[in-house]
Structures are given as structure tokens and as C-alpha cells.
Amino acid sequence: MKHHLHTKSSITCSDCGHTSDETMPLDACVYLYECKSCQKLMTPDSGDCCIFCSRGSHPCPTSQRESRAYRVMPSASLLTDSTVNTAQAS
């Protein structure tokens, strides 16, 4: 099943509230962003990889991919000692 990857995001300034529609890079994180209205230089919140994850309407493509990857992985409780031992023996 193929998921839609959002490549556009609206960034909202933490100072003046101005919103700007931006195209996100597919393979990089944007760490610094200057508000087009008040020129405040914004950085990501602690724990976020980029400005889109902190101030955007959609997280960056890298975070979107990681989020989807974790959703389809089996939970650790599904692994038993025998499956771990079998995998290690291979």
C-alpha cells in the first residue's frame, strides 16, 4: 500500500503568526527559517528535526517516512525467544 507523501507545508511564525506555504525538500531537513513578515529567524523545537516538524502544517518527508515505517513494524511482543534464536542461528 503506497502512502501519499506531503511535500507542501504551511509554516506559522511563532512571533507574529504569519503563515507561509513552502515546498519541503525530500532529502534534507530545514533547520533555520526566516519569517517572510517579521524576519524572525526560527529554529526547531527541542526534539524536532526541522522547522517543518515544529511549525509546519505537515512534518518533513523524512519524519513522515519514519512515522509510517514504525506503524508497519511488528511489535516487540510478537517476537519470541525461538524467533530470536532462529534469526541468530542463520
Image: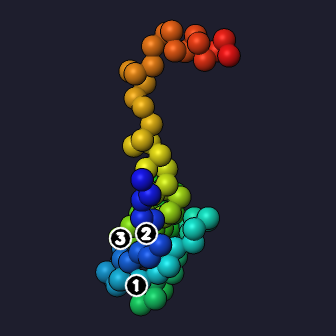
Q: Which residue is mark 1?
A: 20
Instruction: Depth check: give the residue in front, 41 or 71.
Output: 71
Q: Which residue is mark 2?
A: 6
| Residue at the far bottom in the pictured view | 37
Measured as percent of width and height from the top left, residue 69 is found at 47, 46
Measured as percent of width and height from the top left, residue 78 is found at 40, 21
Instruction: Depth check: give the residue in front, 83 or 32.
Output: 83
Residue located 50% across and 63% down the image: 61
| 10 Å crowding of disc 3: few (<14), some (14-19), many (20+) | some
| Residue at the far left in the pictured view | 17
Residue type at the position of mark 2: His
Work out how far the residue at label 2 is from the one at label 1, CA to CA, in angstroms. Answer: 16 Å
Work out how far the residue at label 2 is from the one at label 3, CA to CA, in angstroms. Answer: 10 Å
Residue type at the position of mark 1: Ser
Residue type at the position of mark 3: Ser
| 10 Å crowding of disc 1: few (<14), some (14-19), many (20+) | some
Residue located 44% across and 76% down the image: 8
Residue located 39% across and 43% down the image: 71
Work out how far the residue at label 1 is from the one at label 3, CA to CA, in angstroms. Answer: 10 Å
Measured as percent of width and height from the top left, residue 57 is found at 35, 70
Answer whether residue 46 is visible to the viewer in this image: no
Q: Which residue is mark 3?
A: 57
